[in-house]
Amino acid sequence: MKASARNQLEGIIDNVSIGAVYVEVFIKLKGGEALVASITKQSYDTLNIKVGVEVLALVKAPQIIVVSDFGDYKITARNQFKTIITHIKPGAVNAEVIMKLKGGETLTATITNDSVETLGLNKNAEVTAIFKASAVILAFKNA
């Protein structure tokens, strides 16, 4: 699939939780990590989503937050992946931070160069990549 979303993660739908307006779709990625997408019930009905179906989860790079130290805080964002930075590509204002997941897939975040410096990010650093379930777009073959 060609899309502007840099992050395209393949997985299998593992579980679905249906609410009055929104549906949570739980996706098992290659490395065993669980990704959560929040979609409207209308989308759920239209796409005929079922457990066991292959899915492509799309997340735009600016939606991903990079955290190097949580301190004593917890956050509400459902998708939190422990990663290793494999590459940092600085630009004029922003940098691309490429991180490897347990299963070998990568996530790319775009953050400011100032944030890279403030967080002390470098290659091989362990960080957590975070994004909200509502930031995930689901794509299906022959939906």
Image (cartoon, helix red, strand yellow):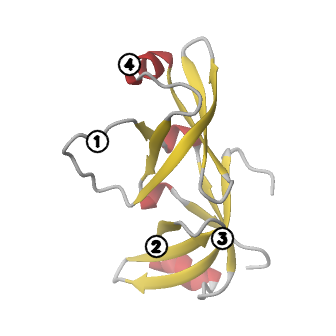
The x and y percentages for residue 132 are 41, 55
Give the spatial CA distance, label 3 vs label 1.
27 Å
Secondary structure at numbered mark 4: helix
Q: Which callout, 3 or 1, points at the residue further toward the start of the chain?
A: 3
The residue where tag 3 is placed is 11
The x and y percentages for residue 70 are 28, 42
The residue where tag 4 is placed is 118
Label of residue 40 in the image: 2
Against 50, is 75 above or below? above
The x and y percentages for residue 86 are 64, 35
Quarter of the image that includes the N terminus: bottom right
Q: Residue at x 80, y 51 (%)?
A: 2
Packing grade of label 3 (10 A; few <14, some 14-19, many >=20) is: many
Secondary structure at numbered mark 2: strand
Q: Nearer the viewer, mark 3 or mark 1?
A: 1
Give yes or no for contact between labels 4 and 2 (Cβ–Cβ under 8 Å): no
The x and y percentages for residue 101 are 60, 52
Give yes or no for contact between labels 3 and 4 (Cβ–Cβ under 8 Å): no
116 or 139: nearer the eye? 116
Q: Residue at x 67, y 72 (%)?
A: 55
Q: Which callout, 3 or 2, points at the residue further toward the start of the chain?
A: 3
Label of residue 70 in the image: 1
- Residue type highlighted by circle 4: Thr
Q: Which callout, 4 or 2, points at the residue further toward the start of the chain?
A: 2
- Residue type highlighted by circle 2: Thr
Q: Which callout, 1 or 4, points at the residue further toward the start of the chain?
A: 1
Quarter of the image that includes the C terminus: bottom right
